[in-house]
Structure formats: structure tokens, C-alpha cells
Image: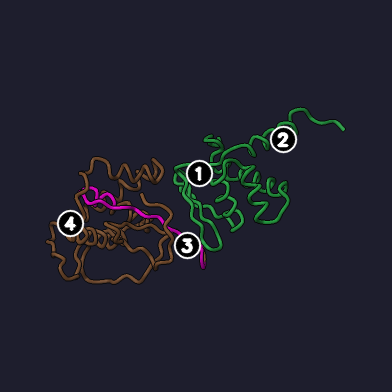
Chain colours: A brown, B green
């Protein structure tokens, strides 16, 4: 389902990014984040098995603190979490493609009171392909594909 | 020739009822027109459906019309085809979309 682009590989573990301005985190925090991602992945799989996608998204956002206004900090945090989710779920067996990543990131962001939209798009040429990603304040925080995907729905 | 009771009259009634119906797209269905195809996503089932350009245009006109009959008249004019032919095609499309839960007939969902 995902439109893959070459992903940069580095020596860093999930949650650590070399981008300027991104704060490095320690081993303990990294481990906590990895655990949170895996827990969110399990919750996302369960939610999708139990309910249609829109309800699954709602349940993953349930009891989350209300979203604070978007700012540079929230975008940076959303991007950091997006990278962490992508890197860690790549190592997890099972279907961890774009929809799973998007659901996991949706839960992580909701838990931090960061508003986000899960976007589902599709393209028909050269062949049919659907894709899902997450946006915060209009900015993609997961890979939105190569620009060929037309938006079908925002959840 | 003996006509089986209920069969043909029922079909005629169904067609007449459908032609008089307002077609809507339920909240759990989203669609988008692409140059060569219309993609319809049923959020309840997670299934994607593809409509060719003609069917996509029909769906646009159906949801923008007061009833299927009005949609048929509009499409017959724009395609330069007999209205009866368009009505038959529209009813077939509606039945197919209703069966998949992609449209509603006067707010009624197909079973």
C-alpha cells in the first residue's frame, strides 16, 4: 500500500535523528519510546480488527489531552516521532506499512496533545496504489509519497 | 405466454422506485475523480473500488440530481443518447453501488 521512497539508513536507533535542532535523547528515553511505539502498534492492530478505520482512529485518540496550538516545537516533535515510528516498525514483523505507521503515530501524537490528521490518498496511474500518512499543521510528518497521491479522506 | 406473477411487475416497480429516488453517498464512503478513473473508498469495509470515467461521471450527476430520473435526463442530453438507454445503465450502476454499500437510495442503505 505504501509508496516507498529510498529511506536514509543511519547508525542511530529509533527516536534519534541527526537533523539540526533535534535534541538527542538518552538510552532510557529511547527505550521508553520504543516500548510506546510497540504498544501503540498492538493497539492499532487491535483497533483495526475491531472497527472500521474511522472508528479505529477515534479510539486511538480517545482520552487524549486536547490539542495545543501548533507551533515549531510541536512540528519538530511530530517529525521526530514520525521518524522513530518509521525506523522501529521497519524492524517489526507483520504488516507495518503506511496505514499501521500512521495509526501508531496518530496515537503517539494524540497522547502528547499534538493535533494531527491521518490522510488516506490514492493514485490510479501507472497502477492503482493507496497510501496513508500523517500531517500536523498541514505538514506531512510521515512520508506522503512522491506527490502523485490524491487525497481521499482526512481522519 | 404466461407471466410469472410478482417477477416482472416487481422488477418494474423496483426500477420505477429507483428512478424516483434521490441518491446520496453515505458518510462512510469517500470518492475522488482521477483523470481516467474514479476511486471510491468504503471506510467501513476498507475496500477501494474503481469506476471507469463514464461511471464516475454518472455518480457525480447522480449525487447532484434530485432523483435518478433527472440524472438520466441530464446525462442523455450531454451524451446524445436515448433517455431509456441511459436510465437502464444508471439503474444498473445504482444497483451495483447499492449492493456494495457505496450509495444510499433516499437515505436507505442496502442490506
Q: Do the residues labelled 4 and 3 touch (CB within 8 Å)?
A: no
Disc 3: host chain: A
Quick check: A155 above or below A16? above
Task: Give SS at disc 3.
Answer: strand
Q: Name the residue under label 4.
A: A31
Residue A83 left/right relative to B65: left
Q: Is residue A113 magenta?
A: yes
What quarter of the picture does the C terminus of chain B occupy?
top right
- Most extreme residue toward the top is B5
Q: Where is residue B8 in the image (x, y as percent from the top left)?
A: 75, 34
Q: Which mark's residue is nearer the viewer, 4 or 1?
A: 1
Give the numbered dot on residue B25.
Answer: 1
Residue at screen point 67% across, 56% down: B79
Q: Mark 2 points at which residue?
A: B12
Task: Give SS at disc 1.
Answer: loop
Do the residues at pointers 4 and 1 share their chain? no
Disc 4: host chain: A
Crowd around label 4: few <14 · some 14–19 · many ≥20 (10 Å): some
Disc 2: host chain: B
Task: Give SS at disc 2.
Answer: helix
Crowd around label 3: few <14 · some 14–19 · many ≥20 (10 Å): many
Amino acid at each position: 500500500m505504501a509508496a516507498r521512497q529510498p529511506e536514509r539508513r543511519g547508525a542511530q536507533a529509533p527516536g534519534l535523528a541527526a537533523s539540526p535542532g533535534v535534541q538527542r535523547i538518552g538510552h532510557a528515553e529511547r527505550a521508553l519510546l520504543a516500548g510506546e511505539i510497540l504498544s501503540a502498534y498492538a493497539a492499532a492492530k487491535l483497533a483495526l480488527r475491531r472497527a472500521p478505520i474511522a472508528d479505529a482512529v477515534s479510539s486511538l485518540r480517545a482520552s487524549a489531552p486536547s490539542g495545543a496550538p501548533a507551533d515549531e516545537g510541536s512540528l519538530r516533535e511530530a517529525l521526530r516521532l514520525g521518524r522513530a515510528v518509521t525506523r522501529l516498525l521497519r524492524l517489526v514483523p507483520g504488516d507495518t506499512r503506511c496505514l499501521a505507521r500512521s495509526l501508531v503515530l496518530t496515537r503517539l501524537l494524540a497522547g502528547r496533545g499534538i493535533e494531527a490528521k491521518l490522510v488516506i490518498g490514492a493514485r490510479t496511474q501507472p497502477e492503482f496504489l493507496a497510501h496513508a500518512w500523517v500531517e500536523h499543521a498541514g505538514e506531512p510528518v510521515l512520508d506522503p509519497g512522491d506527490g502523485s497521491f490524491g487525497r481521499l479522506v482526512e481522519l | 405466454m404466461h407471466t410469472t406473477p410478482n417477477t416482472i411487475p416487481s422488477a418494474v416497480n423496483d426500477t420505477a422506485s429507483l428512478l424516483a429516488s434521490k441518491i446520496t453517498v453515505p458518510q462512510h464512503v469517500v470518492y475522488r475523480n482521477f483523470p481516467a478513473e474514479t476511486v471510491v473508498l468504503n471506510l467501513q469495509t476498507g475496500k477501494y473500488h474503481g469506476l471507469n470515467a463514464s461511471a464516475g461521471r454518472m455518480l457525480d450527476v447522480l449525487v447532484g440530481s434530485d432523483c435518478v430520473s433527472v440524472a438520466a435526463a441530464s446525462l442523455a442530453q450531454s451524451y446524445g443518447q436515448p433517455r431509456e438507454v441511459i436510465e437502464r445503465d444508471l439503474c444498473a450502476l445504482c444497483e451495483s453501488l447499492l449492493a456494495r454499500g457505496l450509495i444510499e437510495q433516499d437515505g436507505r442503505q442496502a442490506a
